[in-house]
Structures are given as structure tokens and as C-alpha cells.
Image (cartoon, rainbow, N blue to C red):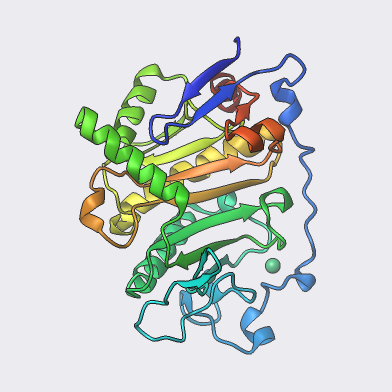
């Protein structure tokens, strides 16, 4: 295909799909090997004994837990000392500052070797159900605005520990990407009286070119306006702004579709590093966001932003999402 500028329906951002002659899909493949540190050097083995602290929760309780939640030892944010009062914005010269208040937890699955796509379906579902459990518990703190849940898989995705784990970071401010996403969804709804995400799901189902995997209740596809090669999104098919209102059954469906999509990605690109994260409506002013549609985004880390991207905010995606979909379909 010839290079094409495409505009994202939600953010309004332009991205440039520019498949280069010298950057074929093959070039994004990794070696298929991943260095696995030994269990005895793993900081997440016997965490309670080593740290002389109890986990926040374990499923099931006791020695034979399959999943546990622990506090991050190097938290990016700290629980507030000010009780129920919201921390105050302070001025420093012309700038606004706020104590980095919040919660930073790590969700750990038991097995040292097998990451999300290699978990049994019941364990993959338990990961998402545990996300929801912590989300609901933490969201009772009225000082918080947003809870981000994500996985960094591999060094290029920012992970320093191999052992499969996920993070939850709760903060008192609305993150800019979420704010823009909410606003874009509201604008679309005002103009078209429809959810912009439901519209995209319907279009991808009709086009059938970029769907990666689909079940009765969830769907994964490569977005038409993908910013990165092999970027994927997983949507629950039923419209809901709030991740935490999902039933266990729906979370199981999303976990299954995510797992299948990541398996295809691993086989297609030979074990690439990636991040995935949940986008959901925020904790406050909830009635404003009925047009939002929660989902999971998967970003394989195969490229590095260069001068044009940093200087313009326009991402160059060197792989046509249609071509990426063809490769995923073979795997
Ligand atoms: Zn381990
Ligand atoms: Zn929707």
C-alpha cells in the first residue's frame, strides 16, 4: 500500500501508516528466545518470607495460592498521610505540584515460567477477577480519580523482573490519555448518538480483515488506525463504561480473547516484548461517561519513537494493520 494518513475516531490524532520497502513484517520478529533467570534469584518467589510481610490477598488462601497481590516495594505513589482529606495542590513558582498519593500493587501468578497466554483459562480468568477485586477495594478511597491496571512484559516493555506479574496504580488525577479518550467518545456520541467503540467493533466485524479472535462476548482486532505494528485491542461486546462492573463471566471471556490474541502475537513475532493495559471510565463523575466502552490495549514493543514522532505527535506505523492481521491469522 501507499503511505496513508489516518485519523483516530476517538482521540482525533493523525497517524501515518507507511509500510517501507526495507521494513517488511519479517523484520519485527524476535529471536524466539527469552532469557529466563533462575527461580532462586527471583524476588517474587517466597515473597512473604523474604520480606517478612503478608500479601494483601491470596487466592486460594494459604500455602497453595495461585495468585497473590503484594505492595510494590518501590512504589511510584504513596498512601496519603492526610486521612480522608484530599491532598492540596501546592504552587512552586509558576508550577502546580501535588504529593504523589495513591496505591501501587503487584499481582503475581504462582508459576515462575508461564506468562498470561500460557495460563489455564481458569487462571487467566482469575487474574482479571483479581484485578476487579482490588479495583473495587481501592476505589472506596474518595481521594482517587483513576486506577490503571497493566502488564509490562520484557525489558523493552519496561519490566525488570521476569516472573509473570501485573501492576495496579491508583492516582488522584485524571491521566491525559484517558481524559482525551473520554472527551473523544463524548464528542462522537453528541454528533452520532452512538458509542464510537461499538461503531468500530461493528465495522471490524463487517470488514473481517483485522479481527484477531472473537467469541460470543468479546472480540480482539488490530485497530484500523494502529499507532504501532501489531497493536491490538480487546473489547467486551456488550457496551459498558466501567471495567469493575463486569461479571465474572464477562471477565473470563475477555481473558480468553486476550490470551488467544497474545498467543498468536507470540507465535507471529517470536516472543516479542509487549505492554497491555485496561482503559476504563474514571472513578468520579461517573454519570458523565455513559458513552465510554472499557477495553484492553496491547502494544508490542518493536519500534522506537524517532524525531518525527517526538516532534509532531504523529506516530509512524511501518506495518499495515491488514498485513499484520494476515500474519496473525496464520498463527
Ligand atoms: Zn519467580
Ligand atoms: Zn460501546
In the displayed structure, would residue 136 be above or below residue 312? below
In the displayed structure, would residue 207 be above or below residue 163? above
Query: Which residue is more in the foreground, 161 or 49?
Result: 161
Query: Where does the C terminus fall, quadrant-wise?
Result: top right
What residue occupies the far bottom of the structure in this picture? 52
Q: Quadrant of residue 317?
A: top right
What residue occupies the far front of the structure in this picture? 93
In this picture, residue 191 sits left or right of residue 2: left
Query: Where does the N terminus fall, quadrant-wise?
Result: top right
In this picture, residue 135 sits left or right of residue 210: left
Q: Quadrant of residue 301?
A: top right
Query: Which residue is more in the foreground, 95 or 225?
Result: 95
Name the residue at 33% across, 43% down.
183
The answer to whether residue 236 shows anywhere in this view is no
The answer to whether residue 309 shows anywhere in this view is yes
Residue 143 x, y percent position in the rendering:
36, 73
Query: Which residue is more in the foreground, 7 or 162?
Result: 7
In this picture, residue 238 sits left or right of residue 115: left
Name the residue at 79% across, 62% down.
37
Residue 224 x, y percent position in the rendering:
47, 25
Residue 176 x, y percent position in the rendering:
46, 50
Name the residue at 47% across, 32% down.
13
Residue 54 x, y percent position in the rendering:
55, 86
Name the residue at 70% across, 52% down.
154
In the displayed structure, would residue 296 be above or below residue 100? above
In the displayed structure, would residue 292 be above or below residue 172? above
In this picture, residue 58 sits left or right of residue 252: right
Amino acid at each position: 500500500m501507499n503511505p496513508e494518513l489516518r485519523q483516530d475516531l476517538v482521540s482525533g490524532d493523525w497517524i501515518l501508516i507507511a509500510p517501507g520497502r526495507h521494513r517488511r513484517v519479517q523484520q519485527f520478529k524476535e529471536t524466539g528466545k527469552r532469557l529466563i533467570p533462575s527461580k532462586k534469584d527471583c524476588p517474587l518467589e517466597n515473597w512473604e518470607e523474604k520480606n517478612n510481610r503478608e500479601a494483601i490477598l491470596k487466592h486460594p488462601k494459604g500455602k497453595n495460592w495461585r495468585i497473590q497481590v503484594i505492595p510494590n516495594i518501590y512504589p511510584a505513589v504513596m498512601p496519603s498521610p492526610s486521612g480522608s482529606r484530599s491532598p492540596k495542590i501546592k504552587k512552586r513558582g509558576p508550577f502546580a505540584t501535588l504529593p504523589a498519593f495513591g496505591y501501587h500493587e503487584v499481582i503475581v501468578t504462582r508459576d515462575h515460567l508461564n506468562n498470561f497466554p500460557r495460563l489455564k483459562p481458569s487462571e487467566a480468568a482469575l487474574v482479571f477477577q483479581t484485578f476487579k477485586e482490588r479495583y473495587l477495594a481501592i476505589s472506596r478511597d474518595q481521594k482517587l480519580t483513576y486506577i490503571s491496571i497493566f502488564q509490562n512484559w520484557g525489558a523493552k516493555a519496561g519490566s525488570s523482573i521476569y516472573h509473570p506479574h501485573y501492576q495496579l496504580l491508583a492516582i488522584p488525577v485524571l491521566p491525559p490519555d484517558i481524559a482525551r479518550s473520554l472527551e473523544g467518545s463524548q464528542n462522537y456520541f453528541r454528533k452520532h448518538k452512538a458509542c464510537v467503540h461499538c461503531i468500530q467493533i461493528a465495522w471490524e466485524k463487517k470488514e473481517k480483515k483485522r479481527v484477531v479472535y472473537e467469541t460470543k462476548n468479546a472480540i480482539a482486532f488490530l485497530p484500523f488506525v494502529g499507532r504501532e505494528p501489531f497493536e491490538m485491542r480487546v473489547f467486551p461486546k456488550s457496551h459498558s463504561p466501567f471495567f469493575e462492573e463486569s461479571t465474572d463471566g464477562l471477565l473470563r471471556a475477555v481473558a480468553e480473547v486476550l490470551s488467544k490474541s497474545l498467543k498468536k502475537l507470540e507465535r507471529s513475532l517470536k516472543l516479542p516484548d509487549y505492554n497491555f493495559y485496561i482503559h476504563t471510565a474514571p472513578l468520579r463523575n461517573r454519570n458523565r461517561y455513559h458513552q465510554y466502552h472499557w477495553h484492553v490495549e496491547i502494544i508490542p514493543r518493536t519500534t522506537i519513537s524517532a524525531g518525527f514522532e517526538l516532534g509532531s505527535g504523529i506516530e509512524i506505523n511501518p506495518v499495515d494493520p491488514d498485513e499484520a492481521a494476515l500474519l496473525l491469522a496464520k498463527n
